[in-house]
Amino acid sequence: MASTADFRNGLVLNYNNELHVITEFQHVKPGKGPAFVRTKMRNIKTGRTIDNTFNAGVKVETARVEQRPHQFLFKDDYGYNFMDNSTFEQITLPEELVPFADIMKEGQEVTILMHAETEQPLTAELPTTVDLVVTYTEPGLRGDTATNTLKPATVETGARIQVPLFVDVDTKIRIKTSDYSYVERVK
């Protein structure tokens, strides 16, 4: 059990008999009335985000979750295959537990959240950014730089993202995994 004072990003709660991870939280102390905590929580199974408000000091049930480093090996008919970096055991996750599969390439390091009591994999998470090579994009128009204009591009994994006009084919770029946005060019 934990109270609202223990809330932090990444804390896993057992809320309505389902596991939710806190993605954002804010302690609010209004001038009139009791304090409360406003949260955004993502359901680990479905990936859906919900907003919830807890009264300050309320006890909530937490779940013990371990983060284990794995390496993505390959995809087959059964799902995505990962290898534990410490024990070299392989596990297969179904597609619904890998939300970012279209920007994940073979050999990519990922973190798999495991429920500590049941040893059941809950979800896989990429690092905050990944580096990928652009395989196709239209050439940018010369002089079209009055505004921050973006164009579609396809990266080596097949995902389509928006990039600035100066990015060309065979350019290695860094992508933010949370919203698939362009960050910078990589040397």
Image (spheres, rainbow, N blue to C red):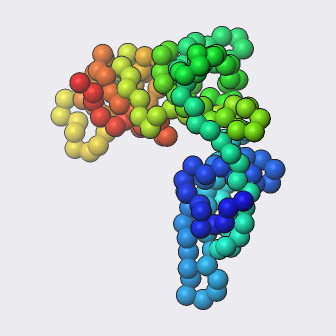
Query: Residue 141's x, y, as percent?
Result: 24, 28
Report the front residue among 90 and 92.
90
Residue 79 found in image quarter: top right
65 sits left or right of 160 in the view: right
Residue 67 found in image quarter: top right
Query: Residue 118's x, y, as percent?
Result: 77, 35
Residue 99 visible in the snapshot: no
Q: Quadrant of the N terminus?
A: bottom right
Report the front residue among 174 and 92.
92
Q: Quadrant of the C terminus?
A: top left
Report the front residue among 187 and 141.
187
Residue at position x 42%, y 21% from top?
154
In the rendered image, the residue lying farthest to the front is 87
In the rendered image, the residue lying farthest to the right is 17
Count of labels shown?
0
Residue at position x 68%, y 45% from top?
64
**Is residue 33 placed above or below 159 in the rendered structure?**
below
Query: Residue 185's x, y, as percent?
Result: 27, 30
In the rendered image, the residue lying farthest to the left is 143
158 sits left or right of 80 in the view: left
**Is residue 19 placed above or below 100 in the rendered structure?**
below
Residue 37 visible in the snapshot: yes
35 sits left or right of 59 in the view: left
Query: Residue 129's x, y, as percent?
Result: 41, 34
Residue at position x 54%, y 53% from top?
9
